[in-house]
Image: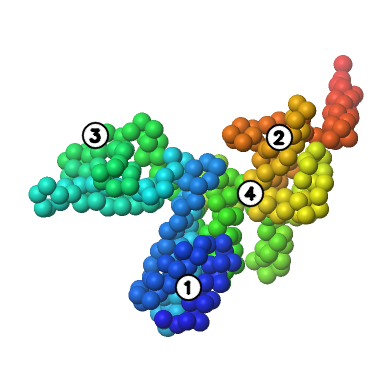
Amino acid sequence: MNLNNLENLKSEMKALGFSKELQEKMEDNMKANLPEFVLKDQINGYKGQIDLNLYFKQSGQSENYYLNKYDVALNEGKPLEAGQKYLVISPSETAGKNNVFKRENVAEAIEVFKKHTGNAELSVGKDAAHKTRLATMEEGKINYVDKEFGRIFRNPPLPQTIWVERGKGFTASQSVNLIEGRAVYREDMLTQGGLPYKAWMKLDLDGPRDRHMNFNMNQYHDPSYGFNLKEVLDKFNIKELENPKEREKLEAQLKNGDRASITVEKNGEQVKLQVEAVPRYSQLNMFAGNGRAEKREQFLKETSINKAVTKSKGKEVSANQGLGV
């Protein structure tokens, strides 16, 4: 194992926001001198469990390894609890014993289950003795699927490929935010001609996937598109904006695609909400702690409300003036 290569890859993993535990697993696989290997991780998001697969490949010319891509997939079903795995159980050739395949990725577990041609069971749990049944198969035919699991079973989550180069690209947290439908701000983008530019990036989750089965990326260029995060934030009565350090932290979180925590006043009391940037509409979305959407207009400053009313009246007058008799 090349120690310089290991050191470089650890730096790349750290820059991309992957855990120290994953870095240690990477080192173990490199020591085993495997030609290629995949590391797996799971993160609980706001909309479900996000599965990440990191792909490492050894050079054909040396013992060095490279990380050029990883993928993310959103499982909108119930996330795995601590210590749980998806279990695919089938009879063993040894009488009275079963084969148990363990997976942390629901799509992989469903794929393994569906490949069986005899009797099999797909469950979730810590082990075969402590499990909850999700689906069963008899003589190769599926005869039961749990109702709550049915949608995921019929349409397993497809991964989105994230390309990276020497630790540069979308970080793990940014990719999680993208696959959950939020926008991420990048200052280090390059055109095909090599010219730098800045833009808010958002996956088109409602559009068709490309020929590689990835979602297309919408880009809202800065400043030409017109979304100014600072100006939009200043329209609202958000307590964190009063403190320069808190404001800087909030802006950084929103640019990372996070749902950031803010303090606002509602019905005469200070309450905590979550906020996310929506560059397409030059707006913010706000949510209560339980994920329920909040009307952002109630948190606007008086000056912003007056401007909005004046603008609305102006549009109404213009429309009336344009009416013919």
Label 2: state its secondary structure: strand
Q: Position of residue 54 (x, y in %)?
A: 46, 62
What residue does disc 3 label? Answer: 143
Q: Quick check: marks 3 and 1 in contact, CB under 8 Å? A: no
Across and down, in percent, residue 129 comes to 25, 44
Compared to residue 180, the image places residue 66 above or below, namely below
Label 4: element kind:
loop
Front-lying residue, 142 or 46: 46
Q: Is residue 33 left or right of residue 291?
A: left
Q: Residue, x 16% and y 47% (percent of image)?
A: 91
As drawn, which residue projects farthest toward the top? 325
In screen coordinates, is 208 left or right of 85?
Answer: right
Which residue bears the numbered disc 2?
Answer: 271
Separation (CA) of disc 4 from disc 3: 41 Å
The amino acid type, in three-letter code, at marker 3 is Asn
Q: Residue at x 60, y 52 (%)?
A: 217
Q: Nearer the viewer, mark 3 or mark 2?
A: 2
Location of mark 4 (residue): 258
Give the Cα distance between marks 2 and 4.
19 Å
Q: Quadrant of the N terminus?
A: bottom left
Distance, label 3 to label 1, CA atoms, is: 44 Å
Location of residue 121 by image quarter: top left
Q: The residue tagged with tag 3: helix, strand or loop? A: strand
Q: Which mark is residue 66?
A: 1
Q: Amino acid at mark 1?
A: Tyr
Which comes before the other along the chain, label 3 or label 1? Answer: 1
Residue 100 drawn above or below residue 65: above
Question: Gap in Å between the C-alphas at discs 4 and 1?
Answer: 28 Å
